[in-house]
Amino acid sequence: MVVGRHQRSSDDTSGDSVDSRHEALRALVEAVGDKVSDYDARVVRLRTQLALQLGCGKDVIEFGVGSPLGKRALLKSVRSYTGVDLLPQNVEELRVAFGSNGRFLVGDCCNSGLAAESADVVFGLAMIYYCEASQVIAEAHRLLRSGGCFFFCSPNPEQPRFSPSPGAYKYLSTLEYKNLAQGTGFEFQVLGGFPYTTSDVGFSRAGELLQRLWAYVPAPLKIQIRKFYKGGVVRLTEDFVEQCESTVLVQLDASNENNYKMFYYILRKN
């Protein structure tokens, strides 16, 4: 999940060192063996499944590779794989786990230095809101061959009880992503997953109060709270994330975005 050029958000403090920001981002990476809520586990599984479908038999570049979770099946199915991550710890872990089965590089997803038009598919799973989206989209466009696609996902920031991730730079709306994508030369498609329920809406007022209080919690404490909250009911394993996810994805436009918790974007290069 860890990205390229880290942007400073309201959770950052001016005294933070680069190492401390990297440590905070490292703590947010989903890893094999983590215990998470059923919903979070299904979100991880669905994005893994979509990546497998889009990358099968293709030359793939992934931004923000994170941990080995979900990589086993992906590396088996693609023609070639290059992963770029800001954190050397993540890259080293993947090199140890998979050796020469893929290429894992320390780098910036906003300016990767990889050859232009070298990929059929670029992935950015749960990472685009940690950096400047326009730069990530432009870099993906540069790397893709004609007809290739950039796949990324992001939570709906307008959903009830939404809590921004510590260190996140900015969550954009579907309309904002559409404008960026089309301005860069992509065809735009967005799918909605995990519709929220009446119970989600019913708790929205309490959630708004908690969210206002959450804004005053220091970033280091937020990281620790989230790590503690990870003690959920589902353990993340390779076998789990490779299973088929039953959630039905729905084609969206900018007018009906707020009915879903997660958005899945597929941008195709003409």
Image: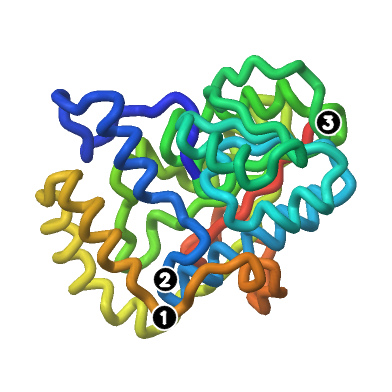
Q: Residue at x 23, y 24 (%)?
A: 17
Label 3–label 1 contact, CB within 8 A = no
The residue indicated by pointer 3 is: 270
Colour approach in the figure: rainbow
Left or right of 269 on screen, residue 69:
left
Numbered mark located on residue 35 in the image: 2
Q: Quadrant of residue 253?
A: bottom right
Percent x, y for residue 83? Answer: 65, 35
Q: Is residue 244 above or below residue 14?
A: below
Percent x, y for residue 9? Answer: 27, 34
Amino acid type of the residue that numbered disc 1 sits on in the rendered structure: Val
Q: Residue at x 71, y 74 (%)?
A: 244
Label 2–label 1 contact, CB within 8 A = yes
Amino acid type of the residue that numbered disc 3 sits on in the rendered structure: Asn
Q: Quadrant of residue 233?
A: bottom left
Q: Nearer the viewer, residue 250 or 38?
A: 38
- Look at discs 3 and 1 and give the one toward the viewer: 1
User: Label 2: few (<14), some or many (≥20) within 10 Å?
Assistant: many
Q: Answer with mark 3 or mark 2, whichever residue precedes in sequence.
A: 2
Q: Answer with mark 3 or mark 1, whichever residue precedes in sequence.
A: 1
Left or right of 211 on screen, residue 167:
right
Report helix, strand or loop for mark 3.
loop
User: Label 3: few (<14), some or many (≥20) within 10 Å?
Assistant: few
The residue indicated by pointer 1 is: 233
Q: Residue at x 39, y 84 (%)?
A: 198
Q: Is residue 130 visible in the rendered structure shown here?
A: yes
Label 3–label 2 contact, CB within 8 A = no
Q: How many marks?
A: 3
Amino acid type of the residue that numbered disc 2 sits on in the rendered structure: Lys
Q: Is residue 57 above or below residue 109?
A: below
Q: From mark 2 to mark 1, how far is it between C-alphas?
A: 6 Å
